[in-house]
Image (cartoon, rainbow, N blue to C red):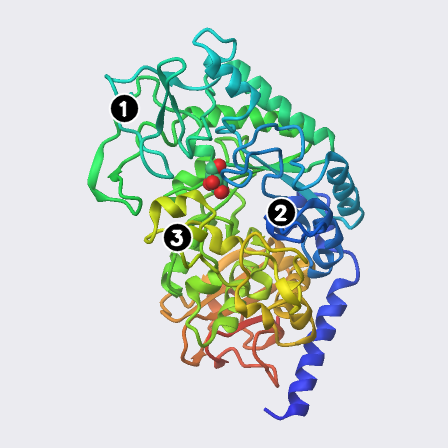
Amino acid sequence: MSKKLFTTFILICCCTALTLRAGPAVSARKDVPWWQHAVFYEIYPRSFTDSNNDGIGDLRGITSKLGYLKDLGIDAIWLTPCYPSPQVDFGYDVSDYKNIDPVYGTLKDFDRLEREASKQGIWIIMDFVLNHTSDQHKWFIDSRSSRTSARRDWYIWHDGRGPGQPPNNWLSIFGGSAWKFDPATNQYYYHRFYPEQPDLNWRNPAVENAMFDVTRWWYKRGVAGFRLDAVSNLFEDPDLRDNPLLPGVNYLGDPKMEDRYNDNLPEVHEVLHDLRKVADEYKAVLIGETWASTAAELKQYYGARGDELQMPMDLAFTKITTLSATEFRNHIAAVDSAGGWPVYVINNHDIVRSYVRYGDGQHNDAIAKLLAGLYLTLRGTPIMYYGEEIGMENNGPVRKEDVKDPVGRVGWPLDKGRDGERTPMQWNDAPNAGFTQGTPWLPIPPSYKSHNVAAELKDPNSVLNFYKQLLALRRHNAALLDGEYIPINKDDPNVLSYVRRTASQTVLVALNMCAAPQTVSFDLSPQGLASTKVHTLLSSTATTQEPDLTQLSLPPFAVYIGEIDK
Ligand code: GLC
């Protein structure tokens, strides 16, 4: 394409995006809960921005970047845990639920972040680690002090089966037995995650009261909701029956087993139902870390009467490892018809970044745009993960001695832990990517030189500018926000296509999931649309004229979004 033509195309894109940000947002509609139109953005505070140059990100750092987030076009921030913690699991081992860890700042810093975010129209969601506390939490210190302590029954204590034998065969997700012997009282306590994360006993009403009280405390401080950590793990079989063994060993070297007696017990739903009642008192939203193996299982988390989680995350995209139009199509159909409002995720702090999962080394940026084009245009609420908008890649440890996440040492070299997806945000091409002037707690990948916010803001063709245009489009497009999801060309193995449709508007999304150019033909007459004309809303590749629906050309990994003329 000639330079002039390219510049004109870019100008059109930019102008469209700019116009879209003006005017009242569809998301201001009163008849739809705010979170249904919102885009959430997960921040791992340790890695976002370091304001005091100790190498670790903090709340003041986040506050300083609110302008960037507003401009990007997100509506809510989910902060992963920043409560006081010994940091064994980097905050998922909470030692005080009603404070901020000094490494991240103070409650005053939190209040300021909340206030400033609210001025920008950005909601704050906290992470609620409700399955377990830190072993340094005062409740556990008391619980382990004697068999008769007032809080003994706040955790799960049991005698072993015999000398040196834990109560049963249950395993920790992070490797080894889920039981740790405590010589002080000659009993074992249960920990589904690290031994430093003892499980709370949710069968004890005192635990429930104390934990519900924590949520009230934060709601009163202004938080708009919680992301609930590891919810399926809240209950265990009271008879402690052994789990059935499966053939083989897992990547941590443990026998494979079906977690029949310590995962996803029905009692979980009673707690979620009660937690929702508290949330409703404050008009708060509950998001679940709901690993479900089927859409039917996911559906249960909404509650039989929509009275549990408003937003159980569908995490299945993170398990689809190849860009298969068929696999994505099938999965979306299952979630979309599950009966609740879908919540889509492609990245988070526990999963290898999508840039690496799907990148082919040649079209990585195009693929990053393709994934944005997918999950930001589906019916549902997307949850982004910091850095995906600039095409951040994983930067896992190369030597075992550099591993920070303990599971990476247990699983080395098969599982190197989660450090790679938690590296500092790449702000510019200055040393340490502008994240800190100290030594960053995790190393930054060399790609920060090209993939950083400052450079990408200047490049009209960057992943970041594509995200910005798409988020701006979505914010004001009723069909993308509320329209029905209708898959089309369902037999195409390469191009995933669908329309999003309201009574007055139909938007077509076509995603070329392969490295070869494709030409697709759409017949929308079964949908009652005779027109073959489409008006381009956004395309990841240059389009010089409005395409014809009977022959839409899609370069490798291209995203095409257009409104069908009536
Ligand atoms: C969740 C978190 C993960 C943490 C675990 C234990 O899966 O996302 O980071 O290690 O719970 O709290």
Foreground residue among 170 and 518 = 170
Q: Is residue 72 left or right of residue 335?
A: right
- In primary-sequence order, the first of circles 2 and 1 is 2
Q: Which circle's residue, 2 or 3, is located before the other in the chain?
A: 2
- Say above or below: 109 vs 502: above
Marking on residue 168: 1
Q: Nearer the viewer, residue 262 or 89?
A: 89
Residue pictured at 76% horizontal, 68% vertical: 19
Residue 357 on image: x %, y %: 42, 62
The residue that appears at 39% across and 52% down in the rendered structure is: 400
Instruction: Report the side of 142 relative to 11 (left or right).
Output: left
Check disc 2: other Cα within 10 Å, few if <14, some if 14-19, many if 20+: many
**Label ID, residue 45:** 2
| Type of amino acid under label 3 | Lys
Q: Is residue 156 above or below residue 336?
A: above
Circle 3 is placed at which residue position? 400
Image x and y of residue 415, in percent: 36, 51
In this view of the protein, can residue 509 be seen by the observer? no
